[in-house]
Amino acid sequence: MKSIILIALIAVAFTARVQERNMAKIQAELAKSTYGSALLHLVELHSMAGGPVQELIDAIEELINDLEEELETLEFDFQVRTNEHNALVVSLEQDIQDAVIDVNNTQDTLDNLLYPRRNQIQSKIDTVIGYQEENRKNYDEAVLVREQEHEAFEAQVAELNDATASVDDALALLASLTNPSLLQIKRFQNTLKNIENKLRSRSRMAPMIKALISLASNQNFSNQDVLKSIVDALNDFRNAVVDQINDLTAQEAQDVIDHEAYLEQLDDEFSEFGRQIDRATVDLTATNEKIDSMVEFRDQRAADQKQYTAELELENNTYAEETDIYTNTKNEFTRELGVSEQALALVQSVDFSNIQV
Protein backbone atom coordinates (compact mmCIF):
# COMPACT_ATOMS: atom_id res chain seq x y z
CA MET A 1 0.00 0.00 0.00
CA LYS A 2 2.79 2.38 0.87
CA SER A 3 4.48 1.42 -2.36
CA ILE A 4 1.39 2.43 -4.32
CA ILE A 5 1.20 5.79 -2.57
CA LEU A 6 4.89 6.39 -3.22
CA ILE A 7 4.51 5.61 -6.89
CA ALA A 8 1.56 7.99 -7.12
CA LEU A 9 3.52 10.79 -5.50
CA ILE A 10 6.41 10.20 -7.87
CA ALA A 11 4.01 10.32 -10.84
CA VAL A 12 2.44 13.55 -9.62
CA ALA A 13 5.84 15.09 -9.11
CA PHE A 14 6.97 13.94 -12.54
CA THR A 15 3.81 15.34 -14.16
CA ALA A 16 4.26 18.64 -12.44
CA ARG A 17 7.84 18.79 -13.60
CA VAL A 18 6.81 18.02 -17.19
CA GLN A 19 4.10 20.67 -17.05
CA GLU A 20 6.62 23.11 -15.69
CA ARG A 21 8.95 22.35 -18.58
CA ASN A 22 6.11 22.73 -21.09
CA MET A 23 5.09 26.06 -19.60
CA ALA A 24 8.65 27.31 -19.81
CA LYS A 25 8.84 26.21 -23.42
CA ILE A 26 5.54 27.88 -24.28
CA GLN A 27 6.63 31.05 -22.50
CA ALA A 28 9.89 31.07 -24.47
CA GLU A 29 8.02 30.62 -27.74
CA LEU A 30 5.61 33.43 -26.89
CA ALA A 31 8.45 35.77 -26.02
CA LYS A 32 9.92 35.40 -29.51
CA SER A 33 7.30 37.68 -31.10
CA THR A 34 5.95 41.11 -30.26
CA TYR A 35 2.40 39.78 -30.25
CA GLY A 36 3.42 36.88 -27.93
CA SER A 37 5.24 39.24 -25.59
CA ALA A 38 2.12 41.41 -25.43
CA LEU A 39 0.06 38.37 -24.46
CA LEU A 40 2.61 37.40 -21.79
CA HIS A 41 2.38 40.93 -20.34
CA LEU A 42 -1.40 40.57 -20.30
CA VAL A 43 -1.11 37.26 -18.46
CA GLU A 44 1.45 38.70 -16.04
CA LEU A 45 -0.66 41.78 -15.33
CA HIS A 46 -3.75 39.64 -14.84
CA SER A 47 -1.79 37.38 -12.49
CA MET A 48 -0.43 40.34 -10.50
CA ALA A 49 -3.91 41.85 -10.28
CA GLY A 50 -5.29 38.57 -9.00
CA GLY A 51 -8.19 38.61 -11.47
CA PRO A 52 -10.28 35.51 -12.17
CA VAL A 53 -8.54 33.09 -14.50
CA GLN A 54 -11.70 32.50 -16.46
CA GLU A 55 -11.86 36.17 -17.52
CA LEU A 56 -8.39 35.89 -19.03
CA ILE A 57 -9.32 32.62 -20.70
CA ASP A 58 -12.46 34.20 -22.14
CA ALA A 59 -10.48 37.22 -23.40
CA ILE A 60 -7.90 35.03 -25.13
CA GLU A 61 -10.60 32.78 -26.60
CA GLU A 62 -12.41 35.89 -27.92
CA LEU A 63 -9.12 37.06 -29.42
CA ILE A 64 -8.68 33.64 -31.05
CA ASN A 65 -12.22 33.82 -32.44
CA ASP A 66 -11.53 37.30 -33.82
CA LEU A 67 -8.35 36.08 -35.48
CA GLU A 68 -10.16 33.08 -36.97
CA GLU A 69 -12.93 35.38 -38.31
CA GLU A 70 -10.38 37.80 -39.76
CA LEU A 71 -8.57 34.88 -41.35
CA GLU A 72 -11.83 33.61 -42.85
CA THR A 73 -12.65 37.13 -44.08
CA LEU A 74 -9.17 37.42 -45.55
CA GLU A 75 -9.59 34.07 -47.33
CA PHE A 76 -13.04 35.02 -48.62
CA ASP A 77 -11.97 38.47 -49.81
CA PHE A 78 -8.91 37.05 -51.53
CA GLN A 79 -10.99 34.37 -53.22
CA VAL A 80 -13.40 37.06 -54.46
CA ARG A 81 -10.42 39.11 -55.67
CA THR A 82 -8.96 36.02 -57.35
CA ASN A 83 -12.23 35.36 -59.15
CA GLU A 84 -12.39 39.00 -60.24
CA HIS A 85 -8.77 38.82 -61.38
CA ASN A 86 -9.31 35.65 -63.38
CA ALA A 87 -12.45 37.07 -65.00
CA LEU A 88 -10.67 40.33 -65.83
CA VAL A 89 -7.66 38.47 -67.26
CA VAL A 90 -9.93 36.34 -69.44
CA SER A 91 -11.81 39.45 -70.60
CA LEU A 92 -8.65 41.42 -71.34
CA GLU A 93 -7.03 38.52 -73.15
CA GLN A 94 -10.19 38.16 -75.26
CA ASP A 95 -10.16 41.91 -75.92
CA ILE A 96 -6.50 41.70 -76.98
CA GLN A 97 -7.22 38.73 -79.24
CA ASP A 98 -10.20 40.51 -80.81
CA ALA A 99 -8.10 43.63 -81.37
CA VAL A 100 -5.32 41.60 -82.98
CA ILE A 101 -7.84 39.89 -85.27
CA ASP A 102 -9.36 43.25 -86.25
CA VAL A 103 -5.93 44.74 -86.98
CA ASN A 104 -4.86 41.73 -89.06
CA ASN A 105 -8.15 41.47 -90.96
CA THR A 106 -8.21 45.20 -91.66
CA GLN A 107 -4.61 45.21 -92.86
CA ASP A 108 -5.33 42.19 -95.04
CA THR A 109 -8.32 43.99 -96.59
CA LEU A 110 -6.19 47.06 -97.21
CA ASP A 111 -3.27 45.13 -98.73
CA ASN A 112 -5.23 42.66 -100.84
CA LEU A 113 -8.34 44.61 -101.82
CA LEU A 114 -8.44 48.35 -101.28
CA TYR A 115 -4.86 49.35 -102.11
CA PRO A 116 -4.85 47.27 -105.35
CA ARG A 117 -8.28 48.66 -106.24
CA ARG A 118 -7.09 52.22 -105.70
CA ASN A 119 -4.03 51.59 -107.88
CA GLN A 120 -6.22 49.99 -110.54
CA ILE A 121 -8.66 52.91 -110.57
CA GLN A 122 -5.84 55.47 -110.65
CA SER A 123 -4.18 53.56 -113.48
CA LYS A 124 -7.47 53.57 -115.40
CA ILE A 125 -7.87 57.32 -114.86
CA ASP A 126 -4.31 57.94 -116.05
CA THR A 127 -4.90 55.76 -119.11
CA VAL A 128 -8.15 57.50 -120.05
CA ILE A 129 -6.51 60.91 -119.50
CA GLY A 130 -3.88 59.71 -121.97
CA TYR A 131 -6.69 58.81 -124.38
CA GLN A 132 -8.14 62.30 -123.94
CA GLU A 133 -4.80 63.93 -124.63
CA GLU A 134 -4.33 61.76 -127.73
CA ASN A 135 -7.88 62.64 -128.77
CA ARG A 136 -7.19 66.38 -128.54
CA LYS A 137 -3.92 65.88 -130.37
CA ASN A 138 -5.76 64.12 -133.20
CA TYR A 139 -8.38 66.88 -133.14
CA ASP A 140 -5.81 69.64 -133.46
CA GLU A 141 -3.96 67.73 -136.18
CA ALA A 142 -7.21 67.16 -138.09
CA VAL A 143 -8.05 70.86 -137.90
CA LEU A 144 -4.56 71.80 -139.08
CA VAL A 145 -4.62 69.28 -141.95
CA ARG A 146 -8.08 70.47 -143.00
CA GLU A 147 -6.90 74.06 -143.03
CA GLN A 148 -3.90 73.07 -145.13
CA GLU A 149 -6.10 71.03 -147.48
CA HIS A 150 -8.54 73.93 -147.80
CA GLU A 151 -5.70 76.34 -148.55
CA ALA A 152 -4.39 73.91 -151.17
CA PHE A 153 -7.90 73.64 -152.62
CA GLU A 154 -8.29 77.39 -152.82
CA ALA A 155 -4.85 77.77 -154.39
CA GLN A 156 -5.59 75.05 -156.93
CA VAL A 157 -8.99 76.54 -157.79
CA ALA A 158 -7.41 79.97 -158.10
CA GLU A 159 -4.79 78.45 -160.40
CA LEU A 160 -7.44 76.78 -162.51
CA ASN A 161 -9.51 79.98 -162.62
CA ASP A 162 -6.45 81.87 -163.82
CA ALA A 163 -5.93 79.20 -166.46
CA THR A 164 -9.57 79.54 -167.50
CA ALA A 165 -9.19 83.31 -167.79
CA SER A 166 -6.04 82.84 -169.85
CA VAL A 167 -7.84 80.39 -172.13
CA ASP A 168 -10.60 82.94 -172.53
CA ASP A 169 -7.95 85.52 -173.44
CA ALA A 170 -6.44 83.11 -175.95
CA LEU A 171 -9.82 82.38 -177.49
CA ALA A 172 -10.55 86.10 -177.75
CA LEU A 173 -7.17 86.62 -179.39
CA LEU A 174 -7.78 83.82 -181.86
CA ALA A 175 -11.17 85.29 -182.70
CA SER A 176 -9.46 88.53 -183.72
CA LEU A 177 -6.97 86.79 -186.02
CA THR A 178 -8.12 87.05 -189.63
CA ASN A 179 -4.74 87.56 -191.29
CA PRO A 180 -2.42 87.24 -188.32
CA SER A 181 0.89 88.94 -188.29
CA LEU A 182 4.00 87.41 -186.84
CA LEU A 183 3.59 89.62 -183.79
CA GLN A 184 0.02 88.41 -183.16
CA ILE A 185 1.08 84.80 -183.53
CA LYS A 186 3.90 85.39 -181.07
CA ARG A 187 1.47 87.04 -178.69
CA PHE A 188 -0.85 84.03 -178.86
CA GLN A 189 2.00 81.65 -178.23
CA ASN A 190 3.04 83.73 -175.22
CA THR A 191 -0.52 83.54 -173.93
CA LEU A 192 -0.36 79.75 -174.10
CA LYS A 193 2.98 79.74 -172.30
CA ASN A 194 1.47 82.01 -169.67
CA ILE A 195 -1.29 79.42 -169.20
CA GLU A 196 1.38 76.75 -168.84
CA ASN A 197 3.21 78.82 -166.24
CA LYS A 198 0.04 79.26 -164.24
CA LEU A 199 -0.62 75.54 -164.24
CA ARG A 200 1.54 73.59 -161.82
CA SER A 201 3.37 70.64 -163.20
CA ARG A 202 1.30 68.30 -161.05
CA SER A 203 -1.95 69.53 -162.67
CA ARG A 204 -3.55 67.04 -164.97
CA MET A 205 -4.13 69.95 -167.37
CA ALA A 206 -0.38 70.46 -167.85
CA PRO A 207 0.09 67.82 -170.61
CA MET A 208 -2.86 69.21 -172.57
CA ILE A 209 -1.59 72.79 -172.53
CA LYS A 210 1.88 71.62 -173.57
CA ALA A 211 0.33 69.83 -176.53
CA LEU A 212 -1.50 73.03 -177.46
CA ILE A 213 1.75 75.02 -177.30
CA SER A 214 3.44 72.49 -179.52
CA LEU A 215 0.52 72.62 -181.93
CA ALA A 216 0.48 76.43 -182.00
CA SER A 217 4.19 76.57 -182.62
CA ASN A 218 4.04 74.44 -185.75
CA GLN A 219 0.84 75.65 -187.41
CA ASN A 220 -0.02 78.28 -190.01
CA PHE A 221 -2.56 80.55 -188.31
CA SER A 222 -3.73 81.90 -191.69
CA ASN A 223 -5.36 78.53 -192.29
CA GLN A 224 -8.90 78.65 -190.91
CA ASP A 225 -8.96 74.92 -190.36
CA VAL A 226 -5.85 75.21 -188.21
CA LEU A 227 -7.42 78.02 -186.24
CA LYS A 228 -10.59 75.99 -185.73
CA SER A 229 -8.64 73.01 -184.46
CA ILE A 230 -6.78 75.22 -182.00
CA VAL A 231 -10.03 76.87 -180.87
CA ASP A 232 -11.62 73.45 -180.41
CA ALA A 233 -8.59 72.29 -178.45
CA LEU A 234 -8.72 75.38 -176.27
CA ASN A 235 -12.44 74.90 -175.65
CA ASP A 236 -11.83 71.27 -174.72
CA PHE A 237 -9.07 72.43 -172.42
CA ARG A 238 -11.32 75.06 -170.89
CA ASN A 239 -14.09 72.52 -170.35
CA ALA A 240 -11.60 70.13 -168.73
CA VAL A 241 -10.43 72.91 -166.42
CA VAL A 242 -14.00 73.74 -165.47
CA ASP A 243 -14.72 70.05 -164.86
CA GLN A 244 -11.66 69.84 -162.65
CA ILE A 245 -12.80 72.91 -160.73
CA ASN A 246 -16.20 71.29 -160.27
CA ASP A 247 -14.59 68.01 -159.16
CA LEU A 248 -12.33 69.82 -156.74
CA THR A 249 -15.25 71.83 -155.38
CA ALA A 250 -17.36 68.69 -154.89
CA GLN A 251 -14.43 66.89 -153.26
CA GLU A 252 -13.83 69.88 -151.00
CA ALA A 253 -17.48 69.84 -149.93
CA GLN A 254 -17.23 66.11 -149.18
CA ASP A 255 -13.95 66.63 -147.35
CA VAL A 256 -15.63 69.30 -145.21
CA ILE A 257 -18.46 66.89 -144.37
CA ASP A 258 -16.02 64.09 -143.56
CA HIS A 259 -13.88 66.46 -141.52
CA GLU A 260 -16.82 67.74 -139.48
CA ALA A 261 -18.02 64.18 -138.93
CA TYR A 262 -14.53 63.17 -137.77
CA LEU A 263 -14.35 66.13 -135.40
CA GLU A 264 -17.78 65.24 -134.05
CA GLN A 265 -16.61 61.67 -133.51
CA LEU A 266 -13.53 62.94 -131.69
CA ASP A 267 -15.71 65.20 -129.53
CA ASP A 268 -18.01 62.29 -128.71
CA GLU A 269 -15.00 60.15 -127.78
CA PHE A 270 -13.58 62.99 -125.68
CA SER A 271 -16.91 63.36 -123.83
CA GLU A 272 -17.08 59.62 -123.24
CA PHE A 273 -13.54 59.67 -121.89
CA GLY A 274 -14.61 62.49 -119.58
CA ARG A 275 -17.57 60.47 -118.31
CA GLN A 276 -15.30 57.49 -117.71
CA ILE A 277 -12.91 59.69 -115.76
CA ASP A 278 -15.77 61.14 -113.74
CA ARG A 279 -17.08 57.68 -112.84
CA ALA A 280 -13.61 56.44 -112.00
CA THR A 281 -12.95 59.56 -109.91
CA VAL A 282 -16.12 58.89 -107.91
CA ASP A 283 -14.95 55.31 -107.36
CA LEU A 284 -11.48 56.54 -106.42
CA THR A 285 -12.89 59.03 -103.93
CA ALA A 286 -15.10 56.36 -102.36
CA THR A 287 -12.17 53.95 -102.23
CA ASN A 288 -9.90 56.54 -100.62
CA GLU A 289 -12.59 57.33 -98.07
CA LYS A 290 -12.95 53.61 -97.33
CA ILE A 291 -9.17 53.30 -97.00
CA ASP A 292 -9.03 56.27 -94.64
CA SER A 293 -11.85 54.80 -92.58
CA MET A 294 -10.21 51.38 -92.36
CA VAL A 295 -6.79 52.85 -91.57
CA GLU A 296 -8.38 54.87 -88.78
CA PHE A 297 -10.16 51.72 -87.52
CA ARG A 298 -6.93 49.68 -87.75
CA ASP A 299 -4.97 52.30 -85.83
CA GLN A 300 -7.72 52.55 -83.20
CA ARG A 301 -7.78 48.79 -82.74
CA ALA A 302 -3.98 48.73 -82.53
CA ALA A 303 -4.22 51.40 -79.83
CA ASP A 304 -6.92 49.30 -78.11
CA GLN A 305 -4.62 46.28 -78.22
CA LYS A 306 -1.82 48.31 -76.66
CA GLN A 307 -4.19 49.66 -74.00
CA TYR A 308 -5.58 46.21 -73.18
CA THR A 309 -2.05 44.80 -72.96
CA ALA A 310 -1.05 47.58 -70.56
CA GLU A 311 -4.19 46.99 -68.49
CA LEU A 312 -3.47 43.25 -68.39
CA GLU A 313 0.11 43.86 -67.31
CA LEU A 314 -1.06 46.29 -64.64
CA GLU A 315 -3.70 43.85 -63.44
CA ASN A 316 -1.19 40.99 -63.23
CA ASN A 317 1.29 43.18 -61.35
CA THR A 318 -1.42 44.46 -59.01
CA TYR A 319 -2.70 40.96 -58.37
CA ALA A 320 0.81 39.72 -57.71
CA GLU A 321 1.29 42.50 -55.15
CA GLU A 322 -2.08 41.74 -53.57
CA THR A 323 -1.18 38.06 -53.49
CA ASP A 324 2.02 38.90 -51.62
CA ILE A 325 0.01 41.06 -49.19
CA TYR A 326 -2.54 38.27 -48.78
CA THR A 327 0.16 35.66 -48.17
CA ASN A 328 2.00 37.84 -45.66
CA THR A 329 -1.23 38.79 -43.89
CA LYS A 330 -2.40 35.19 -43.78
CA ASN A 331 0.95 34.07 -42.40
CA GLU A 332 0.77 36.83 -39.79
CA PHE A 333 -2.78 35.90 -38.81
CA THR A 334 -1.83 32.23 -38.69
CA ARG A 335 1.20 33.03 -36.56
CA GLU A 336 -0.84 35.23 -34.22
CA LEU A 337 -3.50 32.53 -34.00
CA GLY A 338 -0.86 29.98 -33.01
CA VAL A 339 0.59 32.36 -30.46
CA SER A 340 -2.89 33.02 -29.05
CA GLU A 341 -3.56 29.28 -28.77
CA GLN A 342 -0.22 28.85 -26.97
CA ALA A 343 -1.15 31.69 -24.64
CA LEU A 344 -4.50 30.06 -23.97
CA ALA A 345 -2.76 26.82 -23.16
CA LEU A 346 -0.47 28.70 -20.82
CA VAL A 347 -3.38 30.40 -19.04
CA GLN A 348 -5.22 27.12 -18.73
CA SER A 349 -2.21 25.54 -17.02
CA VAL A 350 -2.36 24.73 -13.34
CA ASP A 351 -0.14 27.58 -12.13
CA PHE A 352 1.02 30.67 -14.02
CA SER A 353 1.52 33.03 -11.08
CA ASN A 354 5.27 32.89 -11.54
CA ILE A 355 5.17 34.07 -15.21
CA GLN A 356 7.51 36.99 -15.87
CA VAL A 357 8.32 38.72 -19.15
Image (cartoon, grey):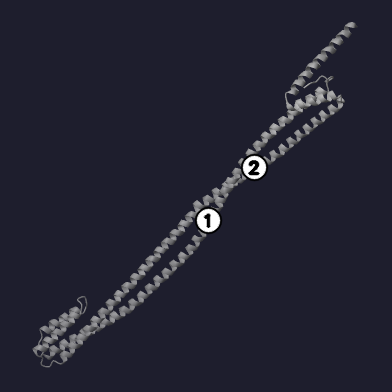
Mark 2 vs mark 1, CA separation in Å: 32 Å
**Residue that label 1 marks:** 292
The answer to whether residue 3 is left or right of residue 103 is right
The answer to whether residue 148 is left or right of residue 126 is left
Which image quadrant for residue 62?
A: top right
Q: What residue do we see at 88% from left, 6% from top?
A: 3
Tag 1 secondary structure:
helix
Which image quadrant for residue 345?
A: top right
- Proximity of marks 2 and 1: CB atoms separated by less than 8 Å: no
Q: Where does residue 305 sit, x and y in percent of width and height?
A: 58, 46
The answer to whether residue 322 is left or right of residue 105 is right
Quadrant into which the N terminus falls: top right
Q: Where does residue 71 sit, x and y in percent of width and height?
A: 75, 33
**23 or 169: nearer the viewer:** 23
Q: What residue do we see at 90% from left, 6% from top?
A: 2
Q: Where does residue 174 sit, x and y in percent of width and height?
A: 15, 90
